[in-house]
Image (spheres, helix red, strand yellow):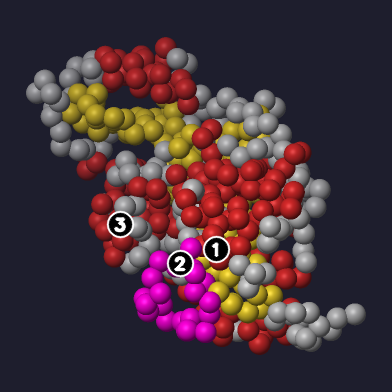
């Protein structure tokens, strides 16, 4: 039997890393710095032998002078000088896809942090890995340093998952936290996030909700055994959130969080990403800043919450390393939790009523009969209004195109269908009693 700490019992595992950005450089640094300690724990030496990146001369704070250099990540993926390929390039197609496929096609194990790649091509790549006997690890693709993928693939046994939801984007959570704590605007928070490196120069992928949607698609497949379907997710970002919404939420005992939510129903899977009112006393409401959290509701454990840093070099590199260690140990599980040919065809469930109402903010014309007309349209579709809030300190100064003054009106509904609310708002807009787009936010009881 092999003794732990005996690094000579097995040949070194030679690792090739494509992409030397923040995560890639951190991973190489960890493997170079902690190699001896990892060998003791693993019983096998881990060695970075080759890398690929755009610029060889860029200072990344690591020594790559003794490593084989590749300009082409596909050539690295096929190289006889590595045993495992790590893809940290990014992007759903292009070099990332070509390199991962090249490695899997020859039976070489792959580790990636690329959620966009997996959301679009995950089923295909999982089948390729199974056909060639390669392992495919992607712990770092969802929620950074939180071991949620390993938990879903290996840690829950026979537990049947009914619902998965959580905060999956650190940029959005940072912005909403700052808005709630410091009474500053979305635009100002976004500028600060960019200055601190939490947001990209073009932040739309994050703030429009698509990063969360890609991660949710992966989690939904792992939880429910259906084929990946990122294009079936209803997605709404946080760009429309204002201090009006933050303040009313606080007064009513809520925080606003961008949640990704997927749940199993009798007629399929419901997936959605949107800003949400969550009770201040709930566990998810306490996850602030750049932290992420994923909650699982199962038949064995009512709710399991996994929380931790969701992005950044060290947390993400740690998750990449976790996959590398599993592969080095010989751990084998189907990439998507079950064999790819056993994944069920995706069935999209109709959006259902939920345990809670809706928050609606709109700029209504300050003319006789406007509020009554709005309430009438709501009533026509069976929507019960729980409360109407009009506060002068929240009023946006606006003038309708016809010269009428406006006032900010907030309505809280009782439990109802989202389709009914949206149809009512469309009719109210057509009636000409409101200015601009209404803000609609779900209220979740969690």
Q: Is residue 104 left or right of residue 355?
A: right
| Image point (45%, 15%), residue name | 381
Which disc, if any, is residue 75? 1
Q: Is residue 101 magenta?
A: no
Residue closer to the observer: 41 or 443: 41
Sequence-wise, the earlier of marks 2 and 3 is 2
Residue drawn at x 51%, y 35% as measured from the top left: 231
Q: Position of residue 38 (x, y in %)?
A: 67, 81
> Counting other residues with Cα less than 10 Å from the Cα at mark 3, is it few (<14), some (14-19), or many (20 or more)?
few
Q: Looking at the picture, tell me which residue is in the foreground, 213 or 323.
A: 323
Give x and y (percent) for residue 229: 58, 37
Up-down relation of residue 184 to residue 322 (above or below): above
The residue that label 2 is drawn on is 71
- Magenta stretch, main secondary structure, is loop
Q: Residue 116's spot in the image, x, y percent?
A: 50, 49
Q: How far apart are labels 1 and 3 at the CA level?
A: 31 Å
Q: For this view, does 355 lie left or right of residue 437?
A: right
**Contact check, label 1 and label 2, Cβ < 8 Å:** yes
Q: Quadrant of residue 383?
A: top left
Give residue 136's quadrant in the image: bottom right
* CA distance for labels 1 and 2: 8 Å
Q: Secondary structure at mark 2?
A: loop
Circle nearer the viewer, 2 or 3: 2
The residue tagged 3 is 201
Looking at the rendering, the stretch of residues picked out in magenta corresponds to 51-72
């Amino acid at each position: 039997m092999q003794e732990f700490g005996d690094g000579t019992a097995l040949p070194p595992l030679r690792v090739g890393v494509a992409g030397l950005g923040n995560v890639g450089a951190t991973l190489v640094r960890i493997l170079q710095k902690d190699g001896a300690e990892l060998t003791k724990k693993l019983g096998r030496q881990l060695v970075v032998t080759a890398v690929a990146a755009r610029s060889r001369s860029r200072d990344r704070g690591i020594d790559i002078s003794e490593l084989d250099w590749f300009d082409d990540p596909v050539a690295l993926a096929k190289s006889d000088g590595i045993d495992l390929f790590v893809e940290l390039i990014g992007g759903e197609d292009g070099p990332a896809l070509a390199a991962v496929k090249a490695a899997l096609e020859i039976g070489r194990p792959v580790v990636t942090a690329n959620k966009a790649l997996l959301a679009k091509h995950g089923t295909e790549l999982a089948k390729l890995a199974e056909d060639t006997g390669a392992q495919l690890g992607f712990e770092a693709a969802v929620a950074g340093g939180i071991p949620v993928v390993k938990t879903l693939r290996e840690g829950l046994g026979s537990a049947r998952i009914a619902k998965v939801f959580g905060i999956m984007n650190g940029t959005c959570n940072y912005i909403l936290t700052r808005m709630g704590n410091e009474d500053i605007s979305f635009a100002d928070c976004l500028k600060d996030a960019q200055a601190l490196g939490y947001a990209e120069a073009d932040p739309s992928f994050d703030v429009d909700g698509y990063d969360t949607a890609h991660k949710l698609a992966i989690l939904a497949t792992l939880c429910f055994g259906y084929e990946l379907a990122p294009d079936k997710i209803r997605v709404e970002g946080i760009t429309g959130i204002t201090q009006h919404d933050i303040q009313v939420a606080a007064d009513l005992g809520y925080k606003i969080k961008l949640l990704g939510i997927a749940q199993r129903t009798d007629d399929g899977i419901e997936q959605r990403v949107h800003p949400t009112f969550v009770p201040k006393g709930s566990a998810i409401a306490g996850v602030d800043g750049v932290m992420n959290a994923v909650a699982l509701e199962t038949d064995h454990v009512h709710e399991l919450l996994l929380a931790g840093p969701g992005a950044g070099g060290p947390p993400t590199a740690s998750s990449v390393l976790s996959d590398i260690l599993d592969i080095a140990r010989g751990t084998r599980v189907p990439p998507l939790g079950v064999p790819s040919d056993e994944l069920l065809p995706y069935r999209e469930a109709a959006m259902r009523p939920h345990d809670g109402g809706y928050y609606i903010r709109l700029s209504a014309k300050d003319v006789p009969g406007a509020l009554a007309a709005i309430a009438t349209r709501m009533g026509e579709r069976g929507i019960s209004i729980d409360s109407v809030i009009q506060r002068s300190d929240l009023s946006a100064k606006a003038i309708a195109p016809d010269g009428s003054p406006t006032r900010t009106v907030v309505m809280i509904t009782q439990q109802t269908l989202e389709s009914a609310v949206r149809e009512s708002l469309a009719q109210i807009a057509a009636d000409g009693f409101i200015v601009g787009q209404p803000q609609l936010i779900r209220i979740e009881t969690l």
